[in-house]
Image (tube, rainbow, N blue to C red):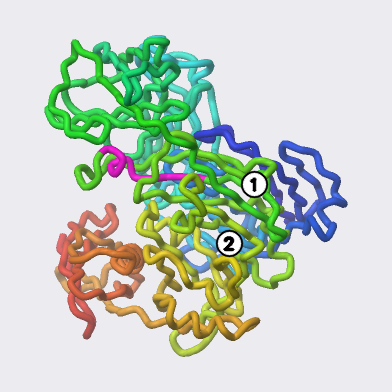
Amino acid sequence: MPAHDIMRLPPFIAIAARIAFAIWIAGPGVLVAQDVEKDVAEQNTAEHAPLQRERLRGSLRDEAGNAIEGANIEAWYAPVASEAVLFGIEDIVTTKTDARGRFELSLLRGAVYSIVGYWKDAEGIARQSMVTTSTGDRLVTLEPAEEVTSGAQVDVVVTGDREAYGILGKLRATVYCDGANWRRFATKPIDGDEPVRFEVPFTGDRGRIKIVVEDDRGPIHINTMFLRKQTKVWKSTVDLPKGPTVDVHVTDKDGKAISGAQIQCPQSAWGSSPWRTHAVTDDEGRASITTIEQFDQQWTMRVRAPGYIEAYAFRSSGQGHLCGKPCTEWAADKPIEFTLESGEPLVGTVLDENGKGLPGIPVAMSYDVSLMVQPNSYRGLGSTAMLATTDEEGKYRFGGVGKPDSLRLVAALPPAILARLSKNSDVVPASWVELDPSRAGSKSEVATLDFSKAAIRVFSIRKPGGTPARGAAIVSLTDHSDSVKEAIERAPRADKRGRVALFVFAEPKSNPLINLFKRSSARSEFAILEGEGWKELRASDLAQEAGKEGEPILLELEPFTERNVLVVDGDGKPIAGVTSNIGGSSWSGSGAMIDFARAANAIGLAQKSDDQGRMRLWSIDVPNMQHRIRFHAQAKTNRNQVVLQLPSPGEEWTVTIAK
């Protein structure tokens, strides 16, 4: 059955980015133009390479190994920069399994898709597989997942005074499947206080979904929900907060009032809640808000104005910081005094293979709010992100931001641009490219991404033993990566030859193949093939390999540490379907290796026992890192869970779960 492909802009983007590209859809031969009209022939000129798609084949079978016919198969590519920012690129491919449970999809080369299968069994019960990720020509085997929820319903309710909160235009909610890519199920208006129901055909890891409530001004609330199978109808309630009147006064360092400054607060003081403008200062630099529900406890506030560096206030009971300085006086009857320092916008450039400005490239910037409030004083305030799109000169701009240590820049190449930049390579790099702020050209220039000084470097990855590591990933980490687990999920994957590619950038007037690993000391690369092995990519080793121009860099993975587990009941009988995961960890030190090992171990130590009660755990054993493993039987068996210290590798580990 032919696949049906959709490419569109999702309605929810934290800061709208208008991206111009055209997609040639494989299959029925339909051109879908987004934002601008392009002639089809233009896509096939030397300047505009046609989009490149590859076949992904797979199968879906039940617990007994029987083929599942007629199941829905979906693959979607919708990269997420951070908690609240989508890049505005979306490609959805759907099909159904045939009589042998097989399916075939046509996916964009270089894009990391999320893939799921969902169906109803003979009893009419909604079922699904786990959501997995894939790229290129990998083979995929999908199996039923008992621990995730499919076919659920969610009621979204918004309460509170909308006028007092400052709702602008129509209030609406969008429900997504959460993961490396966000899959939008539906967007519906929220007109009153009555619940609005959404159908959720499938969910992500641990039944995870995202619910975004927004108006014409932007997102108001983002709720992460974990749906359990025992409940079919869930409820998500958003209470619009209303508190006392809080006055704000904004001036420059000379005491001059700043008009037009935006007074912003997140829904929650902790975590990655979306920031929202609640008031704008008048000609005297004054504004008032009533959306801090508990002024005497915890809250965060940000002030932004054109031509100035943003400033923060954070309060935790009687303590806090204001404009980077400690503050203990938070009188409700006095305005909060913000003093802003002048500052130029942060500007960067994206250049094409000829050194010319590349327009229409979305660039996301994110950083840790804690470091802006006061370095080393708080943790857990979450990150904030903005999205910009390069102009006709290839310039992107972010106004009102200093240069915090946690600054992170990521560009997502639209499919047509990626095809053009990689048209001479038989291995397509990932479309997700991190910009290195340490390569800033001037004080006002954040970072330049120059594809005229780029090389596509191909890695040939081998399993321990030397066979091609099909599906292995190259993971690039920095000190300020949002999530190592998500970095692994969206990393480029090796093809059937074990080959994977990355864009690498050299300094001006240098050989990119010899200098490609002269990177920031805060940047590290790793290779991983889940269940097989891993390797840290050291610059000294790779630089020597990189001197062999035109040849792939050969990487042989180091095997994971394995532990074979037998799960039995109190009578010594094997228990099938027991799941394991990390129930607690301790470690000393910090750095990319620690972060990578923690993320890899979270995957490798989460397994499920087979019919014989056996499971295989794999991990990276790092000195001074210890894990406690939780083993939990299926709820219907009415057995308790146990949490045990991960032992040293050796003989089979027997775990007993008594009734």
Magenta stretch: give its range: 364-373
Amino acid type, residue under disc 2 in the picture: Ala
As drawn, the residue found furthest toward the front would be 254
**Residue 74 visible in the snapshot:** no
Q: Is residue 574 left or right of residue 136?
A: left
Q: Residue at x 29, y 57 (%)?
A: 634
Q: Residue at x 52, y 62 (%)?
A: 142
Residue for badge 2:
430
What secondary structure is found at the residue carrying circle 2?
Answer: loop
- Picture quadrant of residue 212: top left
- Is residue 139 at all visible to an observer of this figure? yes
Residue under pointer 1: 394
Are there few (<14), some (14-19), or many (20+) residues within 10 Å of tag 2?
many
Rendering coords of residue 56 (x, y %): 64, 64
Q: Position of residue 441 (x, y in %)?
A: 51, 54
Q: How many marks overall?
A: 2
User: Percent x, y for residue 252?
Assistant: 35, 24
Name the quadrant of the N terminus.
bottom right
Above or below 517: residue 77: above
Q: What x and y, as percent, mark residue 116?
A: 53, 54
Identify the mark at residue 94; answer none if there is no mark: none
Above or below, comparing residue 159 to residue 84 in the picture: above
- Judging depth in this view, the residue of 40 and 403 nearest the camera is 403
Amino acid identity at mark 1: Gly
- Up-down: is 148 above or below 499? above
Q: Residue at x 43, y 35 (%)?
A: 343
- Mark 1, secondary structure of its residue: loop
